[in-house]
């Protein structure tokens, strides 16, 4: 062929141009949303100049956030529930947080009918952004808010099979309606830090709830004979020069693995922990997403776990019972609990269920999404058995004898240097045979798990099942 | 009106781009005329509407003045070029003007001061563009003294290395009268002249195939290595890469050996790896490319801003004055594509890629139609230079490849970029005129041809071909002109024979000259 070498050059360049064009088209059409939703993108305010921010709805159809006019006729963002949803819905007035941030671009994109859109653009009127429907339930949120009472802390309620968030409360809170007026006061309050969404961003020592991880690792290392484990608890265990005691000096005596877990026996679990293969435990923590990205659209902190073969005995002893360097967020613990309830499969934590245009015309459904298999079905089922026992005879027995069954784990996480002061934890799920909801509670300085967190969780389960 | 302008602009530019490719459905330049005029109308509408929106939204009274003056320059370019060079490619002229028009609008939006500067430079460029094709037949002068071009280029680079200012860590620039020049862009032209001359030097090539000898290839490689080395030392790795690619493709076009391409890509991979290991700023750019968001406040800032701009703008854009393109550092130069994508929309940006592609294809098309090895190779060099520059810029801005800090020809702000682009576009136009004269009328500038002969060809052409007939025959037109094809072939052969004789004579002259010089030494 004549000009063969020149045609070759043309083909090479055509291929590169084609690849580049394809990449550009793909980016503009598909990959753009995640990119432009980044909080560093100051162009969101450019969008806001052209589009009236859309409305956020709760699952019962009530409005969580909308654009409204104030007394002087200025446009303001209005949150009808006030403080109730302050963290999870967030605000869009001083930067954006919560769902306001996660759905920023959707809320600022208008899918109004084309003719209306063009007409408005021609006359210089802003179009209205799309609406977001969430899975949040105001009734449950109200119950959680009340259950947390005056404690600082957080509650996460999640659908066990879908990972959808039904309620998420964090205290101390603030009123999103006036956040811009009171910005200096709210953001400057370092003692209470009300802007922090403790449910997703609060890092707490997991306390005895970490025994779920220790137990899981023990079961993996002894798949056939873990049930034959026995231990005599004398209330304390000493290895080298460090000693671990059971909570508030209790002595559990002769016990098997089930009783050790149900009673949350620190000495027995320290004993188990000392027998574990530390690198493997570290791998397990990694698999359970400690220090990893979580499947959530909200801003969250990464949990921390640092144990390796070089860690000293004291650190190992503390870590396996949830003290030491380990830190976890309530959202992360809720996700682990959800995966156990859901036969080992972790779902994405979703708040957004569907998107419509401002007139309610359906645009997109956000289906529940499997994130990762974090343990086998057998491992999850074995764990459920142990967690059920906690709520029958163990530290969660306030949740027994009810019209519904609960499987869970309590925790009392010591913090700071004050001896005896602890955060009160509970994480669990209802109706283990066909799980309904996951509830994770943390109450700062709330004492033991059974003291405060379990009753708080009970109120939420009661409300969900309509029990008085 | 201003509210809907972005849709109108998108439609205008899309229609324009469509015609860039649709013209090829007509074989005859005569039939294409209506498309070209339509393209001109679309260009004017895009430009005027853009400035109208800018004026309405900014209230800047410079806008209408700038708009009218720019229209005059664009019009002058189109009309005068057509008048002086009726045989030049109108598609290329139109594309130059369209890219300039879009660039004018965007620059006026970004900075009025820069828009004025760019306007003056572009006007100067138009004058150059009008003059250069006239001298194209004198290009043989450069051919015969290609070593001078090569040495001059290298000297300029070395000179710049000592006195030039380093801006943004990796570029050598020179500021003359308030206009910042990137000498490496001029030097690229010299480099192309050099390679084209050397690879087609009859003295050192296989007389049968015309391929360069090993000796020439090696000295070319050494020279190219020197260029690339100096630029690498100046940390201008984007330019170094450009020189390397030009060398590889021109060598391939000259030798027709696929191994050159394969070897070139292996060499590029090795060099990239070496660059990555040696230079911290290369590592930074690769990191910023792989995940610009991980270091969004630092190395990834520019690319992240660019992606925000492209993404937020989406297909139709935020409208002129509706976005924040100024948040991208270097937006008027390397990142103008992102600014266009943000405010005029992804569709317009896509059209810019396609118009650039259309230019590249036209360049290659022209190189294919040239029979003379030297001019043909030069056209290939210019095509590769243009095509690769577009790929590096747009690829970098869209995160397709790591950022190299190269400007987008005709669209980016910058003195040297616009001037150099005008120069090589007009050289290409000159080559096109030359090649069309060559194949259609038999008049070959610089060759001895009698008027009589030319007249005879013309008559034959008219007899054998009825322009009206072509329409009706449609695709069978090619078959229908076999008689003429034969004639052209005959003529070319004759001309080629002449040329051989011409070269033989020249060569001996040249050789004698050199011997004489040697004797003097």
Image (cartoon, grey):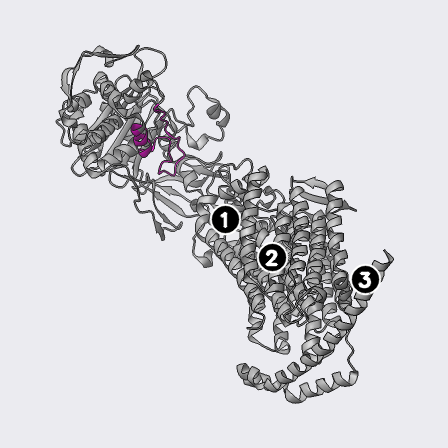
Residues tagged 2 and 1 counted as in contact (Cβ below 8 A): no
Q: Label 3 lies in what chain? A: B
Q: Is residue A175 magenta?
A: no
Could you tell me which secondary element the residue under label 2 belongs to? helix
Residue A261: name its quadrant: top left
The answer to whether dots 1 and 3 both sit on one chain is: yes
Could you tell me which secondary element the residue under label 3 belongs to? helix
Could you tell me which secondary element the residue under label 1 belongs to? helix
Front-lying residue, B49 or A331? A331
Front-lying residue, B409 or B8? B409
The answer to whether dots 3 and 2 both sit on one chain is: yes
| Mark 3 neighbour density, 10 Å: few (under 14) some (14–19) many (20 or more) | few
Q: Label 1 lies in what chain? A: B
Foreground: disc 3 or disc 2: 3
Residue where numbered disc 2 is placed: B248
Considering the whole magenta stretch, tell me its main secondary structure.
loop
Foreground: disc 1 or disc 3: 3
Alpha carbon distance from label 1 to label 3 = 62 Å
Q: Position of residue B172 (x, y in %)?
A: 70, 44
Q: Position of residue B182 (x, y in %)?
A: 71, 48
Q: Label 2 lies in what chain? A: B
Q: Is residue B93 visible?
A: yes
Q: Which mark is residue B311?
A: 1
Q: Which mark is residue B514?
A: 3
Q: Magenta segment, which residues?
A: A280-309
- Give the mark nearest the N terminus, 2 or 1: 2
Alpha carbon distance from label 3 to label 2 = 30 Å
Residue furthest to the bottom in view is B463
Residue furthest to the right in view is B520
- Give the mark nearest the N terminus, 1 or 3: 1
Q: Which mark is residue B15?
A: none
């Amino acid at each position: 062929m004549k000009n063969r070498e020149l045609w070759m050059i043309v083909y090479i360049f055509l291929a590169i141009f084609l690849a580049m064009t394809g990449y550009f088209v793909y980016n503009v059409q598909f990959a753009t949303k995640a990119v432009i939703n980044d909080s560093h993108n100051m162009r969101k305010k450019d969008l806001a100049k052209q589009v009236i921010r859309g409305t956020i709805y709760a699952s019962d159809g009530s409005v969580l956030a909308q654009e409204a006019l104030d007394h002087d006729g200025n446009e303001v963002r209005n949150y009808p529930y006030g403080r109730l949803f302050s963290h999870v819905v967030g605000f869009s007035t001083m930067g954006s947080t919560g769902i306001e941030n996660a759905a920023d671009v959707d809320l600022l994109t208008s899918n109004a009918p084309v003719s209306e859109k063009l007409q408005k653009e021609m006359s210089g009127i802003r179009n209205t952004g799309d609406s977001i429907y969430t899975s949040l339930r105001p009734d449950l949120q109200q119950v959680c808010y009340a259950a947390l009472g005056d404690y600082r802390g957080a509650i996460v309620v999640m659908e066990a099979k879908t990972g959808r968030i039904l309620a998420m409360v964090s205290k101390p809170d603030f009123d999103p309606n006036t956040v811009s007026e009171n910005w200096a006061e709210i953001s400057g309050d370092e003692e209470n830090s009300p802007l922090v969404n403790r449910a997703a961003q609060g890092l707490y020592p997991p306390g005895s709830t970490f025994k779920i991880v220790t137990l899981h690792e023990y079961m993996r290392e002894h798949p056939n004979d873990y049930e034959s484990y026995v231990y005599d608890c004398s209330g304390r265990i000493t290895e080298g020069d460090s000693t671990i005691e059971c909570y508030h000096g209790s002595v559990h005596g002769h016990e098997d693995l089930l009783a050790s877990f149900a009673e949350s026996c620190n000495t027995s679990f320290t004993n188990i922990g000392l027998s574990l293969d530390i690198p493997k435990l570290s791998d397990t923590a990694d698999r359970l997403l400690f220090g990893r990205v979580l499947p959530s659209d909200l801003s969250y902190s990464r949990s921390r776990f640092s144990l390796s073969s070089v860690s000293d005995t004291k650190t190992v002893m503390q870590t396996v019972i949830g003290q030491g360097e380990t830190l976890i967020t309530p959202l992360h613990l809720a996700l682990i609990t959800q995966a156990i309830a859901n036969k080992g499969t972790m779902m994405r934590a979703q708040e957004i269920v569907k998107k419509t245009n401002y007139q309610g015309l359906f645009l997109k459904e956000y289906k529940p999404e499997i994130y990762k298999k974090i343990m086998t079905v057998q491992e999850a089922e074995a764990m459920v058995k142990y967690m059920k026992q906690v709520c029958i005879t163990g530290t969660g027995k306030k949740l027994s004898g009810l019209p519904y069954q609960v499987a869970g784990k309590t925790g009392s996480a010591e913090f700071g240097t004050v001896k005896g002061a602890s955060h009160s934890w509970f994480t669990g799920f209802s109706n283990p045979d066909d799980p309904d909801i996951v509830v994770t509670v943390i109450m700062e300085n709330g004492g033991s798990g059974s003291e405060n967190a379990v009753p708080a969780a009970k109120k939420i389960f009661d409300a969900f099942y309509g029990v008085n | 009106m201003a509210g809907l302008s972005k849709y109108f602009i998108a439609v205008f530019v899309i229609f324009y781009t469509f015609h860039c490719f649709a013209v090829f459905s007509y074989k005859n330049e005569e039939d294409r005329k209506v498309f070209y005029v339509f393209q001109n109308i679309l260009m004017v509408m895009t430009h005027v509407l853009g400035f109208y929106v800018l004026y309405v939204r900014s209230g800047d009274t410079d806008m209408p003045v700038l708009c009218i003056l720019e229209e005059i320059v664009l019009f002058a370019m189109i009309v005068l070029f057509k008048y002086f060079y009726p045989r030049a490619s109108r598609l290329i002229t139109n594309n130059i003007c369209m890219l300039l028009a879009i660039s004018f609008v965007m620059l006026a939006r970004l900075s009025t001061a820069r828009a004025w500067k760019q306007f003056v430079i572009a006007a100067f460029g138009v004058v150059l563009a009008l003059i250069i094709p006239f001298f194209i037949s004198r290009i043989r002068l450069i051919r015969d003294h290609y070593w001078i071009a090569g040495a001059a280029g290298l000297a300029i680079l070395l000179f710049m290395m000592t006195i030039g200012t380093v801006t943004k860590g990796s570029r050598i620039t020179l500021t003359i009268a308030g206009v910042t020049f990137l000498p490496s862009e001029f030097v690229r032209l010299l480099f192309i002249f050099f390679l084209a001359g050397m690879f087609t030097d009859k003295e050192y090539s296989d007389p049968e195939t015309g391929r360069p000898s090993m000796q020439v290839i090696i000295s070319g490689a050494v020279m190219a290595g020197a260029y690339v080395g100096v630029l690498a030392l100046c940390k201008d790795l984007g330019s170094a890469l450009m020189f390397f690619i030009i060398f590889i493709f021109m060598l391939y076009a000259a030798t027709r050996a696929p191994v050159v391409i394969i070897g070139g890509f292996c060499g590029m991979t090795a060099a990239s790896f070496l660059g990555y290991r040696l230079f911290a700023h290369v590592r930074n750019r690769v990191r910023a490319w792989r995940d610009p968001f991980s270091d969004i406040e630092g190395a990834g800032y520019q690319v992240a801003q660019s992606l925000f701009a492209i993404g937020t703008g989406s297909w139709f854009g935020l409208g002129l004055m509706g976005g924040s393109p100024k948040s991208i550092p270097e937006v008027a130069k390397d990142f103008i594509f992102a600014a266009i994508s943000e405010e005029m929309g992804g569709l317009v940006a896509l059209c810019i890629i396609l118009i650039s592609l259309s230019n590249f294809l036209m360049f290659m098309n022209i190189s294919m139609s040239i029979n003379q090895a030297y001019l043909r190779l030069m056209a290939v060099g210019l095509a590769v230079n243009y095509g690769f520059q577009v790929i590096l810029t747009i690829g970098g801005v869209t995160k397709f490849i790591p950022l190299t800090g190269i400007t987008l020809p005709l669209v980016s702000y910058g003195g040297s970029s616009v001037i150099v682009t005008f120069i090589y576009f007009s050289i290409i136009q000159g080559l096109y005129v030359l090649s069309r004269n060559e194949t259609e009328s038999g008049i070959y500038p610089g060759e001895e041809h009698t008027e009589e002969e030319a007249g005879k060809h013309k008559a034959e052409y008219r007899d054998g071909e009825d322009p009206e007939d072509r329409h009706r025959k449609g695709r069978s037109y090619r078959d229908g002109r076999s008689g003429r094809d034969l004639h052209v072939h005959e003529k070319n052969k004759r001309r080629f024979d002449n040329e051989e004789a011409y070269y033989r004579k020249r060569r001996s002259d040249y050789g004698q000259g050199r011997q004489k010089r040697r004797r003097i030494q």
